Amino acid sequence: MRDDIVLIERFPDVDDYLRVRAAAGMHPKTREAAARALPNTLYGVRLERDGEVVGMGRVIGDNGCFFTVVDIAIVPELQGRGLGKRVVAALDAWLLRNVPPSAYVTLVADGDAKYLYSQFGFVESAPVAVNMEYVMEAGGVKSTTHLDPK
């Protein structure tokens, strides 16, 4: 039942952020990276059950021309209950109130998450544009191993 899960308009702290990302199977982030990144959140929400963070999502960007939806994650035992949609709906409401005309709002959809995001107006941009990325590893090594099929 969803009633026991509360949406709070505040992003989790570093410990909860790292824990929920790991639980959801997302690419790990270092404590240093998370500590630097989270204060730059434009808007974020978290889902709590009995005081424990069980889901999250946030918007990052320059607050003018570019806004990016990131870190949509729900702990596995609560996935499939519409909680991701609840998080994205909260982020979408904030975007509608705060994004100026001409700004880009983007995200990277993993797997079937694209079906959730399409409910909020996101469309695939390929072949006009494609996502390109690498992960910075220690010593300035640019890695793409996270993209290898499992």
Image: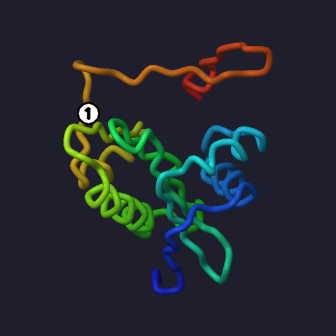
Q: Position of residue 105 (x, y in %)?
A: 32, 41
Q: Position of residue 33 (x, y in %)?
A: 71, 38
Which quadrant holds the C terminus? top right
Where does label 1 land, which residue? 124
Compare residues 102 and 89 and report the one nearer the observer.
102
Q: Is residue 38 left or right of residue 90?
A: right
Work out whether 83 lies above or below 17: below
> Residue at left 62%, top 51%?
39
Mark 1 crowdedness (10 Å alpha carbons): few <14, some 14-19, many ≥20 = some
Q: Position of residue 37 (x, y in %)?
A: 63, 43
The quadrant holding residue 120 is bottom left
Foreground pick, 34 / 73: 34
63 and 120: which one is in front?
Answer: 63
Residue drawn at x 71%, y 13% as measured from the top left? 141
Name the residue rendered at 73%, 21% in the picture: 137
Q: Residue furthest bottom?
A: 3
Question: Measured along the vertical axis of the image, is residue 88 above or below residue 26?
Answer: below
Residue at 26% x, 23% y is: 126
Q: Amino acid at mark 1?
A: Glu
